[in-house]
Image: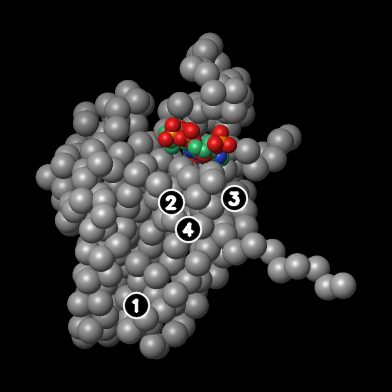
Amino acid sequence: MPDAPAPAHLLVETIDGVATLTLNRPEALNALNAGLRAELLAALKSVARDDAVRAAVLTGAGRAFCAGADLRGGSGERAFRRVLVAEYNPLVRALRELEKPVVAAVNGVAAGAGMSLALAADLVVAAEDVRFLPAFDRIGLVPDSGLTRTLVRALGRHRAAAILYGGETLGAAEAHAAGLVVRVVPGSDLAGAAAELAQRLAAGPTRGIGLTKRLINRAEDDDLAESLDAEAALQELAGRTDDHVEGVAAFTEKREPRFGGR
Ligand code: T3D
């Protein structure tokens, strides 16, 4: 008997020129395991190639957008730099380099690299009770997937520091006031509001919008590649600390971490 097909970690549906990509591991708050990362990258490349797709929505199934890297995805030595360079950074670049508008529809919590990916979209629509939570600090890591530069640029270094290593969350209202979120809606209206925005964009001058995105990237993103490289190098250091090991153990054991500073 042939093997059953592997379960899809990502749902893709295209309607009226809008491709909706739904992170689909709700039992793990859509945490990014290797399969989901690969499927998402393949889907973004397919959206880029398909002339019939003129806008994309990125969202999550269930009660969260995405809880970041899958912390239960295996044991043993992890090659942080390699994984960031080969798997996370291409996702950020694919979102930024796609010459079509991307709308993130964010509900529940967007944590770790899930927060980074949400804010890598062009336009973010958020449920009013959303929590943007870096979470990297809770497991002794550095922010990655472009988050530091996004937050420092939008909020300034002091507020960014409070959020990135002070354990504070960023709520919908503050994210909206800072320009990170374009619209805040009740959770029950999120999918509809994001679809409406994406459909309007998909009916627009797609080539002109794509070229405008290229200009926005040039104006803002000149050092994106450099920032992503720096994150990968520093994550390799942070990932080798005892505090990272302790942070992941504490998460797995559902307790507060006891960091020793090493
Ligand atoms: O190489 C590399 O990996 C480097 C790349 C790093 C990128 C990163 O994103 S690092 C940051 C990783 N993410 C986190 O540290 C967040 C971990 N999750 C949480 O802190 C909490 O789950 C939340 C604050 C996001 C939500 O809390 P809550 O109380 O609403 O839900 P919960 O009960 O903690 O989670 C529900 C389930 O999802 C639970 O499973 P269970 O017990 O019902 O079987 C939980 O284990 C699971 N889950 C949540 N987050 C993750 C996860 N499973 C795997 N990985 C996760 N990140």
Structural distance between the alpha carbons of marks 1 and 2: 21 Å
> Is residue 241 visible in the rendered structure shown here?
no
User: Considering the image in quadrants, where does the C terminus appear?
Assistant: top right
Q: Do the residues labelled 1 and 3 touch (CB within 8 Å)?
A: no
* Residue 65 screen position, x and y as percent: 40, 50
User: Considering the image in quadrants, where does the N terminus appear?
Assistant: bottom right
Position of 138 relative to 74 (above/below):
above
Q: Earlier in the sequence, mark 1 or mark 3?
A: 1
Q: Residue furthest front?
A: 188
Structural distance between the alpha carbons of marks 1 and 3: 25 Å
Q: Name the residue under label 2.
A: 62
User: In the displayed structure, does residue 257 sit left or right of residue 207?
Assistant: right
Q: Name the residue under label 3.
A: 33
Judge the density around disc 1: few (<14), some (14-19), many (≥20) Cα neighbours within 10 Å. many
Which label lies toward us, 2 or 4?
Answer: 2
- The residue drawn where x is 22% and y is 29% is 158
Q: What residue type is labelled 1?
A: Val
Q: What residue type is labelled 2?
A: Gly
Residue 76 falls in image quadrant: top right
